[in-house]
Image (cartoon, rainbow, N blue to C red):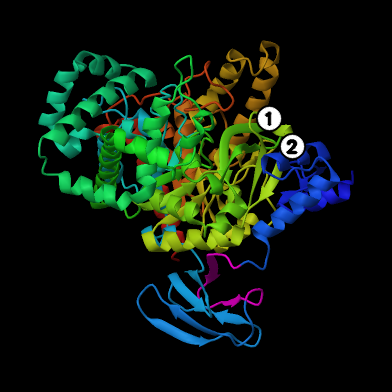
Amino acid sequence: MSDRRLFELAEAAGLSIDWIDADNKEQRVSPEVLRGVLAELGLPADSDDAIADSLHRLDATIGGGTLPPLLTVDRNDRLDLSRFFAPGAPFSLQLEQGERLDGHLDDAAHLRAPDAIGYHQLSIGDSSLCLAVAPHACPTVTERAGPGAWGLTVQLYGLRRPGDGGLGDTEALEQLARNAAAHGAHALGISPVHAMFNAYPDQYSPYSPSSRLFYNALYCSPGSILGERPLRQAIERCGIGAELERLEQLDLVDWPAVSASHQCLLRTLYEDFRTGGNAQQADFDSFRAAGGEMLENHCRFEVLHDHFRSPGGLPQHWRGWPEDYRDPTSEAVRRFAEEHADDVSFYAFSQWLMARGLERAQQAARSAGMPIGLIADLAVGADGGGSQAWSRQSELLASLSVGAPPDIMNRDGQNWGISAFSPWGLKQHGFRAFIEMLRANLAHAGGMRIDHVLGLKRLWVMPAGADPKQGVYLDFPFDDMLRLLCLEAARHDAVILGEDLGTIPPGLRETLARRGILGMRVLLFEHHHGHFHAPGHWSSQALATTTTHDIPTIAGWWQGRDIDWRIRVGQNREDDRERHWNERQHERWGLNRALHADAGGHGEAPSLLDPADAVDASARFLGHSPAPLVLLPVEDALGLDEQPNMPGIIHTHPNWQRRYPGEAATLLDGPVSSRRLAGLAEARQRARRSSHP
């Protein structure tokens, strides 16, 4: 069997045979890995005949001569249509705004795009398609908030308020937004609120959702939408008052117990809502109608997922359901939904409560003076066994898992256990799944952070459950996806942030910057062998932050808490503690020197800062950078020692469970955090003044 033909198929499918790793070394993917990934893409390559057949089917699927349902173009640019139409062909372009433009393609069969952005209908002869005309860039932070903007990031589940029942919710988010705005914050980034699995209360990582189109209803605050009296009555009927109080006192979220109590509460509230002639019924009906097919599919999935259990009583992957139920458009699914209409409606009710709660939180942030308000967090993928993969099977690669190759951050690589979009599935369906996902996540926010934004260009994929070293990069329609992102950002007047850490393709950051998408720079990574970059050398095309949810807080890093944890959970050996601590000492003194110089000191710092002072100085340090936006994690605003998540660890570290030590309404008002935020705000004012000499 010829490797040449195998490589031809791999390249046609968008797989990168050769690539450059994080150490700037050339790598080549083995034929065995290519065959494994191609097989999961439905392109068998285990013989020359199989390769020939796969090439033929691939060409028929994504061949250049097939007119797609949607094409993208930048406003006023020329679109090459020579693959599909003859030069001079007459066309009619019906603009979304109502105007109709008639004309002819030029001598090269190019079409000049209009200045008006939007989704327009293009007709040429007997053919028609959607023409998505995009602005050249997303709205920027400076346009929305002026120079020197800053904000906070928060883990939503960790917020507290009286009566929250053991989990942060949208009402606590409202309170924190007002609290942060009172300290001068321009934005508040929140952890993902994507829909999880109701039947899997033990699966609660916000970056492994069932769907990125809908919400985790456990975060809703029913009392803020329905009123306190119905809430109190429902709690009494469920008999969970004491349990909610117990959960509220815990330092760690007990997700299974929270899920059980909150689901009982929501079910009872729904029964009362359904039978009580509620005045908000019209709003719920309107929300459900607007949600359309995708909302109904998500709600049906929840009921089906709970219904079809294994012989041992456990929920199953949808591929394990009876065959008639694996297709969301089947007659069997339609009949099931009719027979379980009340259950389906309950899940729609839960989504309504969550959507209205987020809407209130964004309104509270803007009303309190935040020019941006909430910044949503978009996970890089969704669970292949979840609602989104079931609903959009032709547009997601449910049998492949996304991750990262071995790199500086993780020498073993990473398998995140989530699925990604199908590049050609997106094109075949007019990028429907991508557009609806963007709209869902921008609906109640002034901005969006895209986790692993590198995934718009390429993703490291591998068969589900495989070692990350058995992966390969899969290319995506980058230009099309960027244009659609710019278009949806403009329509929602939202800023876009991209987490661009890891193995970065050449030129990616420059392309994102031209599109108005801010990259991300993290203080603990901005050094070379312990020599930290001064603020003035930081990028003006990326947001600046002290840490992320996956790495230590500043106080924790300063004290080596992450070193202790890695030994405790078995990632490192006790015998290596001294070596790791010596390395940390070198880095601590390096950061100490940089902080000392930023504060106006000269020469070597006389002593090492204590943890609290190091956090203060780090916040001011970032504030002096030219970054258009500084985001300080609430963990660092409070000077906490522990990080929210340790990647690669599931049971031995309390990932996604830590709650904050104070109520959301006054969380930032303590003397230490108030001083720290005032220092950051003053530093940003200095940056604002320097941008207007």
Question: How far across and how far down the image is residue 27, in percent?
Answer: 81, 43
Question: Which quadrant is home to the C terminus?
Answer: bottom left
Which residue matches tag 1? 466
* Residue type highlighted by circle 1: Ala
Which residue matches tag 2? 36
Packing grade of label 2 (10 A; few <14, some 14-19, many >=20) is: some
User: Are dots 2 and 1 in contact, CB under 8 Å?
Assistant: yes
At 77% across and 40% down in the image, what residue appears?
Answer: 35
The answer to whether residue 688 of the structure is visible from this angle is yes
Label 2, label 1: how many angstroms apart (C-alpha)? Answer: 10 Å
At 49% across and 58% down in the image, what residue appears?
Answer: 485
Identify the image quadrant of residue 277: top left
Q: Give the extent of the magenta segment.
A: 67-84
Q: Is residue 73 magenta?
A: yes
At 84% across and 42% down in the image, what residue appears?
Answer: 47
Q: Callout 2: helix, strand or loop?
A: helix
Q: Nearer the viewer, residue 81 or 611?
A: 81
The answer to whether residue 155 of the structure is visible from this angle is no
Name the side, left or right, on which 20 lies relative to 536.
right
Question: How far across and how far down the image is residue 55, in percent?
Answer: 76, 53
Question: How far across and how far down the image is residue 204, in percent?
Answer: 44, 27
